Image: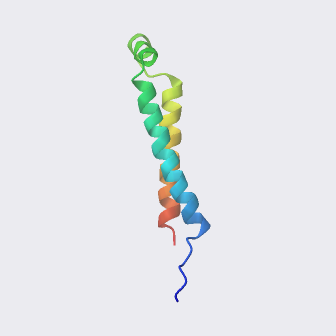
Amino acid sequence: MAKKKALPSNKIIGLILIVVGIGLGYWGYEMSNSLGSQLSSTFAGSPPNEVMYRYIAGAACFVVGIFLVRKK
């Protein structure tokens, strides 16, 4: 009977980072559609910092996750 080859820990961490990155991006998107965020965008001309932090952190997690998954 053949043993299943376990995923290296880097690949597991990469997959987790991809999921976290997608989650942060979605959370930022949901926050940007809130009433407070829309009012802030209307009067200040830009989205609140919290939304941008989640977009940036989500993108960074996603990119690092992709790098770790594709790394040999």
Which residue is drawn at the image coordinates 42% and 15% (left, top)? 35
Query: Residue 68 at what x, y percent from top left?
Result: 53, 62
| Camera-nearest residue between 58 and 2 | 2
Q: Please identify the residue farthest to the right as the structure is shown.
A: 9
Query: Residue 47 at what x, y percent from top left?
Result: 44, 22
Query: Residue 5 at what x, y percent from top left?
Result: 54, 78
| Camera-nearest residue between 15 and 72 | 15
| Camera-nearest residue between 6 and 3 | 3
Instruction: Please say whether residue 59 is visible from this viewpoint.
Output: no
Instruction: Give the left or right position of residue 53, taking residue 37 as reference.
Output: right
Q: Please identify the residue farthest to the bottom as the structure is shown.
A: 1
Query: Residue 54 at what x, y percent from top left?
Result: 51, 35
Which residue is drawn at the image coordinates 41% and 12% (left, top)? 39
Q: Which quadrant of the view contains residue 33? A: top left
Q: How is the image coloured?
A: rainbow
Is 45 situated above or below 14?
above
| Camera-nearest residue between 61 and 30 | 30
Which residue is drawn at the image coordinates 54% and 65% (left, top)? 11
Instruction: Please say whether residue 55 is visible from this viewpoint.
Output: yes
Q: Please identify the residue farthest to the top as the structure is shown.
A: 43
Is 8 situated above or below 45?
below
